[in-house]
Amino acid sequence: MRVQTGTTLVAAIAAAALAVTACSSSGNGGTKNSSSPPAPGTSAPSSSGSSSGGGTQPSGTLGDHNFANCGTSPNDCNTGAVKKGGTVTYTIEKTITGWNLNNANSNTFDFAEVLDGVLPGAFTATPDLKPVLNTDVMVSATQDVKAGVQTLIYKIKPAAVWDDGKPVDFTDFKYAKDTSDGTTCPDCGAASTAGYDQVKTMTSADGGKTVTVVMKQPYADWQSMFGTLYPAHIAAKNGGVSGAAGLAKSFTWLDKNRPSYSAGPYKITGYQKDTSITETPNPKWYGAVKPSLDKLVFRIITDQTQEVPALSNNEVQAVYPQPSGDIVSTAKAVDGVQTYLGKGLTWEHLDLNTVNPVLKDPKLRTAIFTAVSRDDIISRTVGQFVPGIKPLGSHMYVPGQPGYTDNVTSTGQGSGDVAKAKQILTDAGYTGVGSALKNSAGKAIKIRCAFTAGNTLRQQTCQILQSELQQIGVKVTPTPTDDLGGTLDKGNYDLIIFAWVGTPFVVAGAQQIWKLKGGADYGKNNDPAMEKLIDQSATQTDPTKTQDLLNQADVKLTADAYVLPLFQKPTFLAAYQNIVNLRDNATSVGPPYNVQAWGIKS
Protein backbone atom coordinates (compact mmCIF):
# COMPACT_ATOMS: atom_id res chain seq x y z
CA MET A 1 0.00 0.00 0.00
CA ARG A 2 3.05 2.23 0.27
CA VAL A 3 5.53 3.42 -2.27
CA GLN A 4 9.04 4.56 -1.91
CA THR A 5 10.44 7.36 -3.92
CA GLY A 6 14.01 6.47 -4.29
CA THR A 7 16.34 3.62 -4.64
CA THR A 8 16.79 0.82 -2.23
CA LEU A 9 19.85 -1.11 -1.28
CA VAL A 10 19.63 -4.62 -2.48
CA ALA A 11 21.76 -5.47 0.38
CA ALA A 12 18.73 -4.11 2.00
CA ILE A 13 18.29 -0.42 1.98
CA ALA A 14 15.18 1.39 0.89
CA ALA A 15 14.25 5.03 0.69
CA ALA A 16 11.56 7.30 1.98
CA ALA A 17 8.58 8.04 -0.10
CA LEU A 18 9.20 6.02 -3.18
CA ALA A 19 12.81 5.82 -2.34
CA VAL A 20 15.64 3.86 -3.73
CA THR A 21 16.85 1.16 -1.43
CA ALA A 22 19.88 -0.90 -1.07
CA CYS A 23 19.38 -4.57 -1.18
CA SER A 24 21.28 -7.09 0.81
CA SER A 25 19.61 -10.15 -0.45
CA SER A 26 15.91 -10.37 0.15
CA GLY A 27 14.53 -10.33 -3.31
CA ASN A 28 17.49 -8.39 -4.49
CA GLY A 29 20.37 -9.63 -2.49
CA GLY A 30 21.86 -6.90 -0.42
CA THR A 31 20.23 -3.85 -1.80
CA LYS A 32 19.88 -0.29 -0.80
CA ASN A 33 16.85 1.86 -1.60
CA SER A 34 17.40 5.07 -3.34
CA SER A 35 15.46 8.11 -4.22
CA SER A 36 13.50 9.13 -1.22
CA PRO A 37 13.73 8.44 2.37
CA PRO A 38 12.61 4.84 2.53
CA ALA A 39 15.56 3.53 0.70
CA PRO A 40 17.91 4.39 -2.07
CA GLY A 41 16.43 3.02 -5.74
CA THR A 42 15.85 4.59 -9.07
CA SER A 43 12.73 6.06 -10.58
CA ALA A 44 11.86 7.88 -13.72
CA PRO A 45 9.34 10.68 -14.15
CA SER A 46 7.40 8.72 -16.70
CA SER A 47 8.98 5.32 -16.54
CA SER A 48 6.84 2.72 -18.19
CA GLY A 49 9.16 -0.23 -18.25
CA SER A 50 7.34 -3.52 -18.11
CA SER A 51 8.26 -6.55 -16.12
CA SER A 52 10.68 -8.78 -17.94
CA GLY A 53 11.58 -12.36 -17.36
CA GLY A 54 9.27 -15.32 -17.31
CA GLY A 55 7.61 -17.38 -14.66
CA THR A 56 8.78 -20.89 -14.10
CA GLN A 57 6.16 -23.59 -14.41
CA PRO A 58 4.93 -24.47 -10.91
CA SER A 59 4.94 -28.07 -9.80
CA GLY A 60 1.16 -27.98 -9.53
CA THR A 61 -1.59 -25.82 -10.97
CA LEU A 62 -3.75 -23.01 -9.72
CA GLY A 63 -5.92 -22.59 -12.76
CA ASP A 64 -5.29 -19.65 -15.07
CA HIS A 65 -3.78 -17.40 -12.42
CA ASN A 66 -0.41 -18.37 -11.00
CA PHE A 67 3.22 -17.38 -11.27
CA ALA A 68 3.39 -18.70 -14.84
CA ASN A 69 1.43 -15.63 -15.95
CA CYS A 70 3.52 -13.07 -14.09
CA GLY A 71 5.68 -12.24 -17.10
CA THR A 72 2.65 -11.13 -19.13
CA SER A 73 0.16 -10.17 -16.39
CA PRO A 74 2.39 -8.87 -13.59
CA ASN A 75 -0.36 -6.99 -11.74
CA ASP A 76 -2.91 -9.77 -11.46
CA CYS A 77 -1.13 -13.09 -11.76
CA ASN A 78 -1.74 -15.58 -8.96
CA THR A 79 -5.06 -13.93 -8.22
CA GLY A 80 -7.53 -15.93 -6.16
CA ALA A 81 -10.32 -15.85 -3.61
CA VAL A 82 -9.21 -16.26 0.00
CA LYS A 83 -10.67 -17.87 3.07
CA LYS A 84 -10.65 -16.35 6.53
CA GLY A 85 -7.76 -17.12 8.84
CA GLY A 86 -4.32 -18.63 8.61
CA THR A 87 -0.73 -17.43 8.87
CA VAL A 88 1.74 -16.64 6.10
CA THR A 89 5.42 -16.46 6.98
CA TYR A 90 7.62 -14.60 4.50
CA THR A 91 11.39 -14.35 4.73
CA ILE A 92 13.58 -11.28 4.84
CA GLU A 93 17.36 -11.49 4.87
CA LYS A 94 18.43 -8.56 7.03
CA THR A 95 18.09 -7.85 10.70
CA ILE A 96 16.33 -4.69 11.80
CA THR A 97 18.88 -2.02 12.69
CA GLY A 98 16.41 0.83 13.09
CA TRP A 99 12.68 1.51 12.78
CA ASN A 100 12.65 4.78 10.83
CA LEU A 101 12.64 3.97 7.14
CA ASN A 102 13.26 7.63 6.30
CA ASN A 103 16.56 7.46 8.17
CA ALA A 104 19.50 6.82 5.82
CA ASN A 105 20.97 4.11 8.04
CA SER A 106 17.69 2.19 8.39
CA ASN A 107 16.49 2.62 4.83
CA THR A 108 16.79 -0.98 3.68
CA PHE A 109 14.75 -3.01 1.24
CA ASP A 110 13.94 -5.76 3.73
CA PHE A 111 12.70 -3.28 6.31
CA ALA A 112 10.66 -1.50 3.64
CA GLU A 113 8.88 -4.79 2.98
CA VAL A 114 8.02 -5.10 6.67
CA LEU A 115 6.43 -1.64 6.65
CA ASP A 116 4.52 -2.02 3.37
CA GLY A 117 1.39 -2.96 5.31
CA VAL A 118 1.95 -0.57 8.22
CA LEU A 119 2.75 2.96 7.06
CA PRO A 120 0.70 5.06 4.62
CA GLY A 121 1.93 7.00 1.60
CA ALA A 122 0.58 8.99 -1.33
CA PHE A 123 1.75 6.69 -4.14
CA THR A 124 2.83 3.08 -4.49
CA ALA A 125 4.55 1.00 -7.16
CA THR A 126 2.91 -1.97 -8.84
CA PRO A 127 4.50 -5.09 -10.34
CA ASP A 128 4.43 -3.54 -13.82
CA LEU A 129 7.04 -1.11 -12.39
CA LYS A 130 4.76 1.94 -12.55
CA PRO A 131 3.75 4.43 -9.86
CA VAL A 132 0.06 4.53 -8.98
CA LEU A 133 -1.98 6.58 -6.54
CA ASN A 134 -2.50 4.82 -3.21
CA THR A 135 -6.29 4.88 -3.35
CA ASP A 136 -6.61 3.38 0.13
CA VAL A 137 -5.19 6.59 1.57
CA MET A 138 -5.70 9.23 -1.09
CA VAL A 139 -8.68 10.70 -2.91
CA SER A 140 -6.34 12.38 -5.39
CA ALA A 141 -2.90 13.86 -5.91
CA THR A 142 -2.47 16.30 -8.77
CA GLN A 143 -0.05 18.86 -10.07
CA ASP A 144 -0.72 22.23 -11.68
CA VAL A 145 1.97 24.20 -13.49
CA LYS A 146 1.25 27.84 -14.27
CA ALA A 147 3.82 30.43 -15.32
CA GLY A 148 6.54 27.99 -14.38
CA VAL A 149 5.21 27.49 -10.84
CA GLN A 150 4.34 23.92 -9.87
CA THR A 151 1.63 23.38 -7.27
CA LEU A 152 0.88 19.94 -5.85
CA ILE A 153 -2.49 19.24 -4.29
CA TYR A 154 -2.99 16.13 -2.13
CA LYS A 155 -6.47 15.18 -0.95
CA ILE A 156 -6.44 12.58 1.81
CA LYS A 157 -9.41 10.31 2.40
CA PRO A 158 -11.53 11.42 5.36
CA ALA A 159 -11.52 7.81 6.62
CA ALA A 160 -7.71 7.53 6.65
CA VAL A 161 -6.67 7.32 10.31
CA TRP A 162 -3.92 5.98 12.52
CA ASP A 163 -4.94 3.07 14.70
CA ASP A 164 -5.39 5.38 17.70
CA GLY A 165 -8.06 7.26 15.77
CA LYS A 166 -5.95 10.30 14.90
CA PRO A 167 -6.35 11.33 11.26
CA VAL A 168 -3.68 10.91 8.60
CA ASP A 169 -3.37 14.56 7.65
CA PHE A 170 -1.31 17.62 6.81
CA THR A 171 0.83 17.29 9.94
CA ASP A 172 2.17 13.93 8.76
CA PHE A 173 3.04 15.35 5.34
CA LYS A 174 4.70 18.37 6.94
CA TYR A 175 6.74 16.17 9.28
CA ALA A 176 7.98 14.13 6.31
CA LYS A 177 9.07 17.28 4.51
CA ASP A 178 10.70 18.94 7.54
CA THR A 179 12.77 15.87 8.41
CA SER A 180 13.79 15.23 4.81
CA ASP A 181 14.54 18.59 3.18
CA GLY A 182 18.10 18.70 4.52
CA THR A 183 17.85 22.19 6.01
CA THR A 184 14.94 22.32 8.46
CA CYS A 185 16.52 19.41 10.33
CA PRO A 186 20.14 19.12 9.16
CA ASP A 187 20.91 16.45 11.79
CA CYS A 188 18.05 14.14 10.83
CA GLY A 189 20.13 12.14 8.34
CA ALA A 190 17.31 11.66 5.86
CA ALA A 191 17.55 8.79 3.40
CA SER A 192 16.73 11.22 0.62
CA THR A 193 16.20 14.95 0.24
CA ALA A 194 14.96 14.64 -3.35
CA GLY A 195 11.95 16.88 -3.97
CA TYR A 196 11.65 17.96 -0.36
CA ASP A 197 14.54 20.37 -0.78
CA GLN A 198 12.54 22.11 -3.53
CA VAL A 199 9.44 22.81 -1.43
CA LYS A 200 8.67 26.51 -1.10
CA THR A 201 5.49 26.41 0.98
CA MET A 202 3.04 23.88 2.44
CA THR A 203 -0.49 24.82 3.49
CA SER A 204 -3.46 22.94 4.92
CA ALA A 205 -7.19 22.99 4.25
CA ASP A 206 -10.30 20.88 4.90
CA GLY A 207 -9.30 20.12 8.46
CA GLY A 208 -5.86 18.94 7.39
CA LYS A 209 -7.17 16.57 4.74
CA THR A 210 -6.01 18.76 1.83
CA VAL A 211 -2.30 19.49 1.50
CA THR A 212 -1.09 22.12 -0.95
CA VAL A 213 2.61 22.22 -1.80
CA VAL A 214 4.16 24.99 -3.88
CA MET A 215 7.54 24.12 -5.33
CA LYS A 216 10.45 26.50 -5.84
CA GLN A 217 10.75 25.10 -9.34
CA PRO A 218 8.99 22.24 -11.16
CA TYR A 219 10.01 18.81 -9.93
CA ALA A 220 9.66 16.01 -12.48
CA ASP A 221 9.38 13.17 -9.96
CA TRP A 222 6.89 14.84 -7.64
CA GLN A 223 4.98 11.56 -7.29
CA SER A 224 7.99 10.14 -5.47
CA MET A 225 7.41 12.40 -2.47
CA PHE A 226 5.50 11.51 0.70
CA GLY A 227 5.78 7.78 0.07
CA THR A 228 6.40 6.83 3.69
CA LEU A 229 4.55 8.82 6.34
CA TYR A 230 5.18 8.62 10.08
CA PRO A 231 2.63 9.91 12.65
CA ALA A 232 3.43 13.52 13.49
CA HIS A 233 1.29 13.38 16.63
CA ILE A 234 3.49 10.56 17.98
CA ALA A 235 6.64 12.46 17.00
CA ALA A 236 5.31 15.54 18.80
CA LYS A 237 5.17 13.60 22.06
CA ASN A 238 8.67 12.19 21.66
CA GLY A 239 10.91 15.08 20.75
CA GLY A 240 8.87 17.53 18.75
CA VAL A 241 7.75 18.51 15.27
CA SER A 242 9.23 22.00 15.16
CA GLY A 243 12.73 23.36 15.46
CA ALA A 244 15.85 21.52 14.34
CA ALA A 245 16.59 20.04 17.76
CA GLY A 246 13.05 18.79 18.37
CA LEU A 247 12.75 17.30 14.91
CA ALA A 248 16.10 15.53 15.25
CA LYS A 249 15.10 14.13 18.63
CA SER A 250 11.78 12.74 17.41
CA PHE A 251 13.35 11.45 14.19
CA THR A 252 15.88 9.52 16.28
CA TRP A 253 13.15 8.31 18.65
CA LEU A 254 11.19 6.89 15.72
CA ASP A 255 14.32 5.02 14.64
CA LYS A 256 14.99 3.52 18.06
CA ASN A 257 11.45 2.48 18.92
CA ARG A 258 9.44 -0.27 17.24
CA PRO A 259 6.24 1.11 15.70
CA SER A 260 3.28 0.50 17.97
CA TYR A 261 1.21 2.59 15.56
CA SER A 262 -0.23 1.83 12.14
CA ALA A 263 -2.28 3.44 9.39
CA GLY A 264 -2.14 0.36 7.20
CA PRO A 265 -3.94 -2.99 7.00
CA TYR A 266 -1.56 -4.56 9.53
CA LYS A 267 0.19 -3.50 12.72
CA ILE A 268 3.32 -4.86 14.35
CA THR A 269 2.31 -6.85 17.41
CA GLY A 270 5.37 -8.99 18.01
CA TYR A 271 9.13 -8.80 17.57
CA GLN A 272 11.85 -11.30 18.37
CA LYS A 273 15.17 -9.60 17.79
CA ASP A 274 17.04 -11.00 14.80
CA THR A 275 14.36 -13.69 14.44
CA SER A 276 10.96 -12.39 13.34
CA ILE A 277 8.43 -9.57 13.15
CA THR A 278 4.77 -10.49 13.62
CA GLU A 279 1.91 -8.41 12.22
CA THR A 280 -1.80 -8.80 12.82
CA PRO A 281 -4.76 -7.02 11.21
CA ASN A 282 -5.24 -3.38 12.17
CA PRO A 283 -8.82 -3.09 13.53
CA LYS A 284 -8.93 0.56 12.41
CA TRP A 285 -7.99 -0.24 8.82
CA TYR A 286 -10.11 1.84 6.47
CA GLY A 287 -9.04 0.39 3.11
CA ALA A 288 -11.25 -1.43 0.62
CA VAL A 289 -9.60 -4.84 1.08
CA LYS A 290 -9.60 -6.21 4.62
CA PRO A 291 -6.86 -8.68 5.63
CA SER A 292 -8.02 -12.29 5.75
CA LEU A 293 -4.95 -13.66 7.54
CA ASP A 294 -4.77 -13.97 11.31
CA LYS A 295 -1.03 -13.31 11.20
CA LEU A 296 1.64 -12.15 8.81
CA VAL A 297 5.14 -13.09 9.97
CA PHE A 298 8.41 -11.77 8.55
CA ARG A 299 11.00 -14.40 9.40
CA ILE A 300 14.59 -13.12 9.46
CA ILE A 301 16.97 -15.61 7.83
CA THR A 302 20.31 -13.94 7.15
CA ASP A 303 21.92 -17.08 5.70
CA GLN A 304 20.10 -17.42 2.40
CA THR A 305 21.15 -21.07 2.07
CA GLN A 306 18.70 -21.79 4.91
CA GLU A 307 15.67 -20.20 3.23
CA VAL A 308 14.70 -23.04 0.91
CA PRO A 309 15.13 -25.67 3.66
CA ALA A 310 12.77 -23.57 5.81
CA LEU A 311 10.36 -23.47 2.87
CA SER A 312 10.65 -27.22 2.36
CA ASN A 313 9.84 -27.79 6.04
CA ASN A 314 6.87 -25.40 5.80
CA GLU A 315 8.45 -23.21 8.49
CA VAL A 316 7.94 -20.38 6.00
CA GLN A 317 5.49 -20.23 3.13
CA ALA A 318 7.18 -17.70 0.84
CA VAL A 319 10.80 -16.71 0.15
CA TYR A 320 12.24 -13.88 -1.94
CA PRO A 321 16.01 -14.46 -1.89
CA GLN A 322 18.67 -13.20 -4.20
CA PRO A 323 18.76 -16.22 -6.47
CA SER A 324 21.62 -18.61 -7.04
CA GLY A 325 21.65 -21.76 -9.12
CA ASP A 326 21.26 -23.95 -6.03
CA ILE A 327 18.44 -21.85 -4.58
CA VAL A 328 16.46 -21.89 -7.83
CA SER A 329 16.86 -25.61 -8.46
CA THR A 330 16.13 -26.72 -4.90
CA ALA A 331 13.10 -24.44 -4.57
CA LYS A 332 11.62 -25.82 -7.78
CA ALA A 333 11.91 -29.31 -6.33
CA VAL A 334 9.82 -28.55 -3.22
CA ASP A 335 6.45 -30.25 -3.52
CA GLY A 336 3.52 -27.84 -3.69
CA VAL A 337 5.67 -24.77 -4.34
CA GLN A 338 5.55 -22.51 -7.39
CA THR A 339 8.43 -20.27 -8.43
CA TYR A 340 9.00 -17.17 -10.55
CA LEU A 341 12.26 -15.82 -11.95
CA GLY A 342 12.09 -12.28 -13.32
CA LYS A 343 13.81 -8.93 -13.65
CA GLY A 344 12.96 -5.43 -12.55
CA LEU A 345 14.50 -2.16 -11.41
CA THR A 346 17.24 -3.64 -9.24
CA TRP A 347 20.86 -3.58 -10.35
CA GLU A 348 24.10 -4.89 -8.91
CA HIS A 349 27.21 -2.70 -8.79
CA LEU A 350 30.70 -2.24 -7.42
CA ASP A 351 31.45 0.92 -5.42
CA LEU A 352 34.80 2.44 -4.54
CA ASN A 353 35.13 4.75 -1.54
CA THR A 354 36.59 8.04 -2.80
CA VAL A 355 37.36 9.15 0.77
CA ASN A 356 39.94 6.37 1.00
CA PRO A 357 43.36 8.10 0.75
CA VAL A 358 44.55 5.88 -2.10
CA LEU A 359 41.22 5.49 -3.89
CA LYS A 360 40.68 9.24 -4.16
CA ASP A 361 42.81 9.05 -7.32
CA PRO A 362 40.41 8.70 -10.29
CA LYS A 363 43.16 7.16 -12.43
CA LEU A 364 43.59 4.30 -9.98
CA ARG A 365 39.83 3.84 -9.81
CA THR A 366 39.62 3.81 -13.62
CA ALA A 367 42.40 1.21 -13.83
CA ILE A 368 40.68 -1.00 -11.25
CA PHE A 369 37.36 -0.91 -13.10
CA THR A 370 39.11 -1.49 -16.43
CA ALA A 371 40.75 -4.64 -15.06
CA VAL A 372 37.39 -5.97 -13.88
CA SER A 373 35.63 -8.25 -16.34
CA ARG A 374 31.88 -7.95 -16.00
CA ASP A 375 31.36 -10.76 -18.50
CA ASP A 376 33.49 -13.02 -16.33
CA ILE A 377 31.57 -12.08 -13.17
CA ILE A 378 28.23 -12.70 -14.88
CA SER A 379 29.23 -16.01 -16.44
CA ARG A 380 30.52 -17.34 -13.11
CA THR A 381 27.58 -16.16 -11.00
CA VAL A 382 24.08 -15.23 -12.22
CA GLY A 383 24.75 -16.33 -15.78
CA GLN A 384 24.80 -19.94 -14.63
CA PHE A 385 21.05 -19.95 -13.99
CA VAL A 386 19.66 -16.89 -15.80
CA PRO A 387 20.42 -16.94 -19.53
CA GLY A 388 20.89 -13.74 -21.49
CA ILE A 389 22.06 -11.40 -18.72
CA LYS A 390 24.29 -8.67 -20.15
CA PRO A 391 26.50 -6.05 -18.49
CA LEU A 392 24.54 -2.95 -17.49
CA GLY A 393 25.58 0.22 -19.28
CA SER A 394 23.95 2.94 -17.20
CA HIS A 395 23.85 4.34 -13.67
CA MET A 396 20.40 5.82 -14.33
CA TYR A 397 18.25 3.32 -16.21
CA VAL A 398 17.88 -0.40 -16.76
CA PRO A 399 17.16 -1.97 -20.15
CA GLY A 400 13.53 -1.53 -21.14
CA GLN A 401 13.15 1.87 -19.49
CA PRO A 402 12.78 4.89 -21.76
CA GLY A 403 16.11 6.70 -21.79
CA TYR A 404 18.35 3.66 -21.34
CA THR A 405 21.70 4.28 -23.09
CA ASP A 406 24.91 2.33 -22.65
CA ASN A 407 27.41 4.97 -21.48
CA VAL A 408 29.83 2.52 -19.84
CA THR A 409 31.00 -0.13 -22.29
CA SER A 410 32.76 2.24 -24.70
CA THR A 411 34.98 3.56 -21.88
CA GLY A 412 36.55 0.14 -21.32
CA GLN A 413 35.41 -0.02 -17.71
CA GLY A 414 34.27 -3.55 -16.91
CA SER A 415 36.07 -4.94 -19.96
CA GLY A 416 38.73 -6.95 -18.14
CA ASP A 417 41.43 -5.28 -20.28
CA VAL A 418 44.40 -5.85 -17.98
CA ALA A 419 46.92 -4.43 -20.47
CA LYS A 420 45.01 -1.16 -20.69
CA ALA A 421 44.66 -1.00 -16.91
CA LYS A 422 48.40 -1.51 -16.47
CA GLN A 423 49.14 1.26 -18.96
CA ILE A 424 46.84 3.68 -17.08
CA LEU A 425 48.74 2.94 -13.87
CA THR A 426 52.18 3.18 -15.46
CA ASP A 427 51.32 6.54 -17.06
CA ALA A 428 50.08 7.78 -13.68
CA GLY A 429 53.40 7.01 -12.01
CA TYR A 430 52.47 3.85 -10.09
CA THR A 431 55.15 1.26 -9.40
CA GLY A 432 54.90 -2.48 -8.93
CA VAL A 433 52.32 -2.66 -11.71
CA GLY A 434 51.34 -6.31 -12.10
CA SER A 435 53.08 -7.44 -8.90
CA ALA A 436 52.67 -5.29 -5.75
CA LEU A 437 51.16 -1.96 -6.76
CA LYS A 438 52.26 1.23 -5.00
CA ASN A 439 51.36 4.85 -5.62
CA SER A 440 53.85 7.69 -6.02
CA ALA A 441 54.01 8.08 -2.24
CA GLY A 442 55.06 4.44 -1.89
CA LYS A 443 51.72 3.37 -0.41
CA ALA A 444 50.77 -0.23 -1.19
CA ILE A 445 47.37 -0.57 -2.83
CA LYS A 446 45.47 -3.02 -0.64
CA ILE A 447 41.67 -2.93 -0.53
CA ARG A 448 38.86 -4.76 1.24
CA CYS A 449 36.00 -6.07 -0.90
CA ALA A 450 32.93 -5.87 1.33
CA PHE A 451 29.89 -8.06 0.69
CA THR A 452 26.73 -8.98 2.56
CA ALA A 453 27.40 -11.89 4.91
CA GLY A 454 25.59 -15.02 3.78
CA ASN A 455 25.25 -13.82 0.18
CA THR A 456 26.96 -16.50 -1.89
CA LEU A 457 26.97 -14.67 -5.21
CA ARG A 458 28.47 -11.53 -3.73
CA GLN A 459 31.13 -13.52 -1.93
CA GLN A 460 31.96 -15.23 -5.22
CA THR A 461 32.21 -11.85 -6.92
CA CYS A 462 34.73 -10.59 -4.35
CA GLN A 463 36.74 -13.77 -4.88
CA ILE A 464 36.69 -13.19 -8.65
CA LEU A 465 37.86 -9.61 -8.10
CA GLN A 466 40.63 -10.89 -5.87
CA SER A 467 41.99 -12.86 -8.81
CA GLU A 468 41.35 -10.21 -11.48
CA LEU A 469 42.89 -7.29 -9.60
CA GLN A 470 45.90 -9.32 -8.55
CA GLN A 471 46.91 -9.12 -12.23
CA ILE A 472 47.51 -5.37 -11.88
CA GLY A 473 49.15 -5.68 -8.45
CA VAL A 474 46.17 -4.82 -6.23
CA LYS A 475 45.68 -7.04 -3.17
CA VAL A 476 42.00 -7.67 -2.44
CA THR A 477 40.65 -9.13 0.79
CA PRO A 478 37.00 -10.35 0.74
CA THR A 479 35.32 -8.92 3.86
CA PRO A 480 31.77 -9.89 4.92
CA THR A 481 29.47 -7.43 6.69
CA ASP A 482 26.28 -8.27 8.56
CA ASP A 483 25.21 -4.60 8.62
CA LEU A 484 25.13 -3.28 5.08
CA GLY A 485 23.37 -0.06 6.02
CA GLY A 486 25.81 0.67 8.81
CA THR A 487 28.83 -0.20 6.68
CA LEU A 488 27.68 2.14 3.94
CA ASP A 489 26.58 4.92 6.25
CA LYS A 490 29.91 4.91 8.10
CA GLY A 491 31.92 4.55 4.90
CA ASN A 492 33.64 1.52 6.42
CA TYR A 493 34.68 -0.06 3.12
CA ASP A 494 37.17 0.32 0.29
CA LEU A 495 35.32 -1.62 -2.40
CA ILE A 496 31.79 -2.91 -1.82
CA ILE A 497 29.24 -4.85 -3.83
CA PHE A 498 25.52 -4.34 -3.33
CA ALA A 499 22.45 -3.45 -5.34
CA TRP A 500 20.05 -0.56 -5.69
CA VAL A 501 16.37 -1.49 -5.58
CA GLY A 502 14.68 1.04 -7.79
CA THR A 503 11.37 2.76 -8.17
CA PRO A 504 9.76 4.26 -11.27
CA PHE A 505 11.26 7.63 -10.33
CA VAL A 506 14.65 7.90 -12.01
CA VAL A 507 15.23 11.58 -11.23
CA ALA A 508 14.45 11.16 -7.54
CA GLY A 509 16.77 8.17 -7.41
CA ALA A 510 19.55 10.09 -9.17
CA GLN A 511 19.27 12.98 -6.72
CA GLN A 512 19.34 10.60 -3.80
CA ILE A 513 22.30 8.43 -4.70
CA TRP A 514 24.49 10.56 -6.97
CA LYS A 515 24.42 13.94 -5.22
CA LEU A 516 26.98 14.42 -2.45
CA LYS A 517 24.25 15.61 -0.06
CA GLY A 518 21.43 13.54 -1.53
CA GLY A 519 21.32 11.09 1.35
CA ALA A 520 22.89 8.01 -0.23
CA ASP A 521 26.15 9.00 -1.94
CA TYR A 522 28.10 6.62 0.27
CA GLY A 523 31.24 6.79 -1.87
CA LYS A 524 31.34 10.59 -1.32
CA ASN A 525 31.96 11.43 -4.96
CA ASN A 526 32.07 15.19 -5.46
CA ASP A 527 31.18 16.25 -9.02
CA PRO A 528 29.32 19.59 -9.11
CA ALA A 529 29.01 19.58 -12.91
CA MET A 530 27.34 16.16 -12.83
CA GLU A 531 25.02 17.23 -10.02
CA LYS A 532 24.01 20.34 -11.96
CA LEU A 533 22.84 18.16 -14.86
CA ILE A 534 20.79 15.99 -12.50
CA ASP A 535 19.18 19.05 -10.94
CA GLN A 536 18.40 20.42 -14.40
CA SER A 537 16.75 17.11 -15.31
CA ALA A 538 14.50 17.40 -12.28
CA THR A 539 12.93 20.64 -13.50
CA GLN A 540 11.92 19.36 -16.93
CA THR A 541 8.34 18.61 -17.92
CA ASP A 542 9.39 16.95 -21.20
CA PRO A 543 10.54 13.34 -20.50
CA THR A 544 12.92 13.34 -23.47
CA LYS A 545 14.77 16.37 -22.05
CA THR A 546 14.93 14.69 -18.68
CA GLN A 547 16.39 11.56 -20.23
CA ASP A 548 18.96 13.53 -22.24
CA LEU A 549 20.19 15.43 -19.19
CA LEU A 550 20.39 12.28 -17.08
CA ASN A 551 22.43 10.58 -19.78
CA GLN A 552 24.80 13.55 -19.87
CA ALA A 553 25.15 13.20 -16.10
CA ASP A 554 25.72 9.47 -16.54
CA VAL A 555 28.65 10.10 -18.88
CA LYS A 556 30.29 12.19 -16.17
CA LEU A 557 29.49 9.59 -13.50
CA THR A 558 31.15 6.93 -15.61
CA ALA A 559 34.24 9.12 -15.98
CA ASP A 560 34.35 9.57 -12.19
CA ALA A 561 34.91 5.79 -11.98
CA TYR A 562 33.63 5.16 -8.48
CA VAL A 563 30.58 3.02 -9.26
CA LEU A 564 30.67 0.27 -11.86
CA PRO A 565 27.25 -1.11 -12.89
CA LEU A 566 27.39 -4.89 -13.20
CA PHE A 567 24.00 -6.21 -14.31
CA GLN A 568 20.25 -5.96 -13.91
CA LYS A 569 19.53 -8.33 -11.06
CA PRO A 570 17.17 -11.27 -11.37
CA THR A 571 14.45 -11.63 -8.77
CA PHE A 572 13.20 -14.96 -7.47
CA LEU A 573 9.95 -15.64 -5.66
CA ALA A 574 8.92 -19.07 -4.36
CA ALA A 575 5.71 -19.75 -2.44
CA TYR A 576 3.28 -22.52 -1.69
CA GLN A 577 0.52 -22.76 -4.27
CA ASN A 578 -2.23 -22.22 -1.73
CA ILE A 579 -0.99 -18.67 -1.08
CA VAL A 580 -2.82 -16.35 -3.46
CA ASN A 581 -2.55 -12.68 -4.45
CA LEU A 582 1.18 -12.82 -3.68
CA ARG A 583 3.34 -11.88 -6.67
CA ASP A 584 6.71 -10.42 -7.59
CA ASN A 585 7.15 -6.64 -7.41
CA ALA A 586 10.70 -5.88 -8.52
CA THR A 587 10.74 -2.32 -7.18
CA SER A 588 11.77 -0.93 -3.79
CA VAL A 589 8.32 -1.88 -2.46
CA GLY A 590 8.71 -5.62 -2.99
CA PRO A 591 6.03 -8.34 -3.08
CA PRO A 592 4.36 -7.14 0.18
CA TYR A 593 3.02 -4.09 -1.68
CA ASN A 594 -0.47 -5.65 -1.38
CA VAL A 595 -0.24 -7.69 1.84
CA GLN A 596 -3.84 -6.88 2.72
CA ALA A 597 -4.86 -9.13 -0.20
CA TRP A 598 -2.59 -12.07 0.65
CA GLY A 599 -4.40 -15.11 1.89
CA ILE A 600 -5.00 -18.84 1.88
CA LYS A 601 -6.73 -19.97 -1.28
CA SER A 602 -10.45 -20.51 -0.77
Image (cartoon, rainbow, N blue to C red):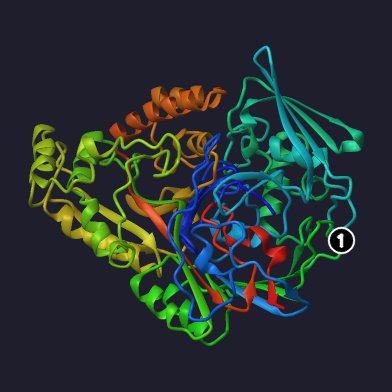
Q: Position of residue 121 (x, y in %)?
A: 71, 47
Q: Residue furthest top?
A: 147
The residue sitting at 74% across, 49% down in the picture is 230
Residue under label 1, please give it: 284
Label 1 residue SS? loop
Q: Quadrant of residue 152?
A: top right
The answer to which of 218 and 200 lies nearer the viewer is: 218
Q: Residue furthest front?
A: 64
218 left or right of 245?
left
User: Within 10 angstroms of label 1, few (less than 14), some, or many (20 or more) residues?
Assistant: some
Q: Quadrant of residue 85?
A: bottom right
Q: Position of residue 245 (x, y in %)?
A: 71, 38
The answer to which of 295 and 236 lies nearer the viewer is: 295
The residue sitting at 53% across, 52% down in the picture is 587
328 left or right of 182?
left
The residue sitting at 78% across, 48% down in the picture is 137
Q: Position of residue 133 (x, y in %)?
A: 70, 44
Q: Quadrant of residue 224?
A: top right
Instruction: Look at the picture and state if 212 lies above or below 119.
Output: above
